[in-house]
Image (cartoon, rainbow, N blue to C red):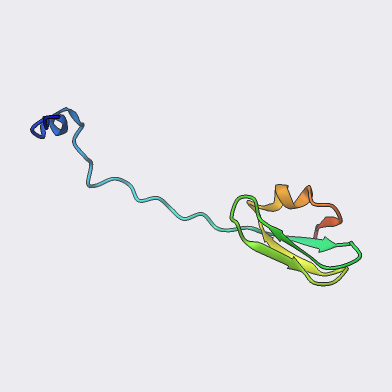
Amino acid sequence: MSCCGSKRRDFLPPSNHFSTPVQATEVVFVTFRYTGQRGIAVTGGVTGRKYRFLNPGDEVQVDGRDAPGMSAVPNTVRVYT
C-alpha cells in the first residue's frame, strides 16, 4: 500500500486558529425527594453521576441534565421551591 505523499492535506480547508471559544454553560440543579421504603442509588443517564438517597425522605440535588431520567425512577419526586 502506498502513501498519498501528504497530498490529502492539500484538499482540507484551512483551519481557523481564531475560532470563537465555546462558552461553558451554567449547571442547573434540581432537587428530588425519595419516598421509597429503603435507600437507593441512581446513576444519572447523561452525566453518569451517582445520586444516593440513603433514607426515605432524603432530598438530593440532581444535575439538570439528569433530571428527566430521575423523574422516571420510581419513588422519586421533583421538589419545586
State whether residue 59 is above or below residue 20: below
Q: Quadrant of residue 52?
A: bottom right
Q: Position of residue 29 (x, y in %)?
A: 66, 60
* Residue 5, above or below 74: above
**Residue at horizontal 18 percent and vertical 36 percent from the top:** 14
Q: Residue furthest bottom?
A: 54
Most distant residue in the front direction? 1
In this picture, residue 25 sits left or right of residue 69: left
> How far across and how far down the image is residue 3, in percent?
11, 32
Q: Is residue 4 above or below residue 19?
A: above
Q: Residue furthest right?
A: 37
Q: Which residue lies at the image location 84% right of the left edge and 63% below the top edge? A: 34
Taking the spot 83% from the left edge, 56% from the top edge, the residue there is 76
Residue 80, image quadrant: bottom right
Q: Position of residue 78 (x, y in %)?
A: 80, 56
Quarter of the figure with the C terminus: bottom right
Instruction: Residue 32: name its quadrant.
Output: bottom right
Which image quadrant: the N terminus?
top left
The residue closer to the viewer here, 36 or 64, is 36
x, y percent for residue 13: 21, 32
Number of numbered labels in the structure image = 0
Q: Is residue 54 left or right of residue 27?
A: right
Question: For this rendering, which residue is in front, 7 or 1?
Answer: 1
